[in-house]
Image (cartoon, helix red, strand yellow):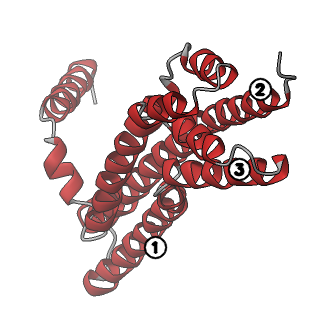
């Protein structure tokens, strides 16, 4: 084989590689090669996105508290305007307002009973904020498992095709490899995103819990202040 022949072969191979690279596969067509397991993985991704934005907006709203709210409550309580304090709580749509409202309604009863009533309302408000977060955590765990199942199914498909043809070729194993790699990548991607969203939302909830605890302590301290 002379030098000219080698150069011709190299140029031909280079042209073939460039042509193959230029033929990009659409994303949708690529995803369909993952097989039927892409359906549950896709559903899990949709559920994850819905839960994240639903909880994010709710928790975000809970962090937006009027900084003057507790000051106004303090003034009303000191001036013995309990009804005005209740009206303010009723008009304020927030977790802190509902918690303080329950405490105001218990004024005159033992301090321990007031603390317990506020704590119960606070726990209930936190429970509402954490709604469906458990589902997001579950998705973070099971989405990669669906990808692993796809990996096993892809390997089985490869060996099955080889057994039928009694030979090994790229064409025989490409289908199984597509299913194996695509489902694994999709499952891991959905799982990682759900995992990040789950912990991100939990951090946000923890901040709200801190705000509720601080407001409850301020209210209890207010009730313990000596009357001037």
Q: Going by the image, does 197 lie left or right of 164? A: right
Q: Quadrant of residue 108?
A: top right
Marks 2 and 3 in Cβ contact (< 8 Å): no
> Is 52 drawn above or below residue 41 in the view shown?
above
Marks 1 and 3 in Cβ contact (< 8 Å): no
Name the element at disc 2. helix
Q: Which mark is residue 152?
A: 1
Q: Which residue is mark 3?
A: 119
Circle 3 packing at 10 Å, graded few (<14), some (14-19), many (20+), is: some
> Is 188 drawn above or below residue 207 in the view shown?
below
Q: Earlier in the sequence, mark 2 or mark 1?
A: 1
Q: Going by the image, does 8 lie left or right of 153? A: left
Question: Looking at the picture, how far across and down is residue 33, in whole percent?
Answer: 22, 60
Q: Which mark is residue 11?
A: none
Question: Looking at the picture, how far across and down is residue 46, in whole percent?
Answer: 29, 53
Q: Which residue is mark 2?
A: 222
């Amino acid at each position: 084989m002379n030098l000219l022949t080698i150069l011709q072969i190299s140029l031909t191979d280079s042209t073939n590689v460039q042509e193959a690279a230029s033929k990009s596969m659409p994303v949708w067509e690529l995803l369909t090669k993952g097989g039927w397991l892409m359906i549950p993985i896709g559903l899990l991704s949709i559920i994850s996105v819905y839960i994240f934005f639903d909880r994010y907006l709710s928790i975000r709203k809970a962090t937006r508290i009027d900084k003057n709210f507790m000051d106004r409550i303090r003034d009303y309580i000191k001036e013995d305007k309990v009804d005005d304090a209740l009206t303010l709580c009723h008009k304020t749509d927030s977790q802190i307002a509902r918690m303080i409202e329950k405490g105001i309604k218990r004024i005159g009863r033992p301090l321990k009973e007031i603390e317990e009533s506020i704590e119960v309302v606070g726990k209930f408000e936190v429970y509402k904020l954490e709604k469906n977060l458990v589902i997001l955590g579950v998705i973070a765990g099971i989405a990669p498992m669906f990808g692993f199942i796809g990996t096993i199914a892809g390997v089985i498909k490869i060996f099955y095709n080889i057994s039928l043809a009694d030979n090994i070729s790229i064409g025989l194993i490409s289908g199984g490899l597509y299913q194996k790699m695509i489902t694994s990548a999709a499952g891991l991607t959905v799982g990682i995103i759900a995992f990040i969203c789950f912990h991100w939302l939990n951090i946000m909830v923890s901040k709200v819990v801190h705000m509720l605890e601080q407001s409850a302590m301020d209210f209890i301290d207010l009730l313990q202040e000596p009357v001037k």
